[in-house]
Amino acid sequence: MTVTTIAIAIRDVTMEYPSPEGVKHVLGGVSYDVTEGHYVSIVGPSGVGKTTLLRLLTGLAQPTGGEILVQGNRLSGAPEGLAVVLQDYTRSLMPWLTVEKNIALPLRNARLDNARLSKAQVRERIDGALAEVGLEGNAKAYPWQLSGGMQQRVSIARALAVRPRILVMDEPFASVDAQTRFDLEDLVLKVRADFGITTIMVTHDIDEAVYLSDEVVVLHGRPAQVTDVVSVELPFPRSQVETRNDHRFAELRTRIYEKVRGLS
Amino acid sequence: MPAVIRRIPAGLVSAVVALLVWQLVGTVGPLAGDSFATASEAIGALALLLGDPQFWGAVLETLQMAVLGFVISMAIGVPLGFLIGLSRFAYRSTKFTFDFFKVIPPIVLIPIAILVIGPSIAMGVWLVVFANVFAAAIQTAYGVRDADPVLLETMRCYRMGVLQQIRYVRLPSASVQIAISMRIAAAASLIVAVVAGLVGGAPGLGHLLALYQSSGTSDRTYAVVLALGILGLTISRLIVRAQRRVVFWSGR
């Protein structure tokens, strides 16, 4: 039996904030342990607090109760080794920088053996990340010269270039067309196979959650709590046709669907 | 459409029509026979003015006031606006006062300016600065505050500090608004520099305009107006071209 380590421990986290209608309780005691190297999806009905939870995990906001431990340290601010991919790629890439400069920007703060990266190391990281996402020829382009799917690939390349320990994605494929969505999902599976980065993804799409994840966490209720943790034991490598036609895939999505709807 | 016609610039067509209407108004139209100068007379006068050193002296004086005033107002307004924009409190608290100064037409300050500085190039420069500095500061501050929160949060996730966010996100974001404010200020600078001469006694094309008007030489008066139009258009074209190069991503 392999020993599992906990990358992120979410302990009884509550989140409430004042609103004109009184105090809003968004999260009511959320607890969950993210296993190192796992791909975890968070699903739940709209407005349940998925994105709020992500903001807490990235250190952009502080919980009003409970705590989040990353590698055993209590979180305050963005944890070291964090990378993010957001839904709105047009707003999270800088239009005034070329693709390679967008990728290079977070590398200013990257350290290797406590030293800044050399120019050659930065170059290597950029080229490696662009190759991984299949955008080798687009280093000098500006983001707005690329299609939506390609821009999201740039976001993923930027994330990979920092060699993250934790990758957080908020609805990463919600703004692209269906075909591009399948391509990006398969890209994420490839990245997963290549690097095994601990990944937490928020999504509305239950099929996508099952297809990509080791575990699917269902948030439900007001204030929200974890109502189910579904382990996805579908074999790797996964493929759009075979995996989605597996009878276990159908069972998992039915179970998660009912939980998200609050039917069981 | 035949290829010959398509090659004619569209702008030229309307310009020719406008001149034609002007000519007709002054020859067979309602203003025929009056002291109203026709297009051909004005253009003829302009051709003469172009050979007149006094005219070129006035052009230089006007440009001196406009350019100097423009540069000073940007040198003060943009850094000031940038600092104000970095703090939400500073932005909110100064906005009211700056908006107040912004809406005061510089022409109403001419009486004060004449008293304090006297009719001179310095007065023209001062008026141009006053006309632009507040708008430039507000616009710049707005640009700094308007930086996309998604972009700022993305950079925070990548552990970028406040100074890095200012340098890599807020400054480039603000540059779009700075460029817009420069374009507006460039046009305003020329207008104010002329008005300073027209009603404030400062030298330059405005002064020349007043001189020709009072001596009843309407062809020369109109020629100066034509020259001002050409000057203004040239400046605005240059600024737009520069803007497209500097903030090339804007509007994409």
Image (cartoon, rainbow, N blue to C red):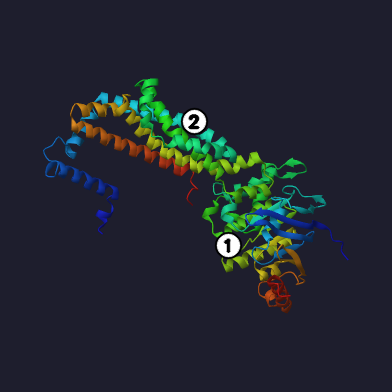
Name the element at disc 1.
Answer: loop
Residue at x 67% of width, y 47% of height: B156
**Horizontal arrangement in the rendering, residue B90 relative to residue B36 (left or right):** right
Question: Which of A10/B183 is in front?
Answer: A10
Name the element at disc 2.
Answer: helix
* Quarter of the view holding residue B103: top left
Q: Position of residue B65 (x, y in %)?
A: 38, 27
Chain ID at mark 1: A
Q: Position of residue A23 (x, y in %)?
A: 68, 55
Instruction: Say the numbered circle drawn on residue A175.
Output: 1
Q: Disc 1 and disc 2: Cα gap in Å?
A: 42 Å
Q: Residues within 10 Å of mark 1 (few under 14, many from 20)?
A: some
Q: Position of residue A52 (x, y in %)?
A: 68, 57
Question: Which of A53/B177 is in front?
Answer: A53
The residue identified by callout 2 is B75
Res A221 seen here: yes
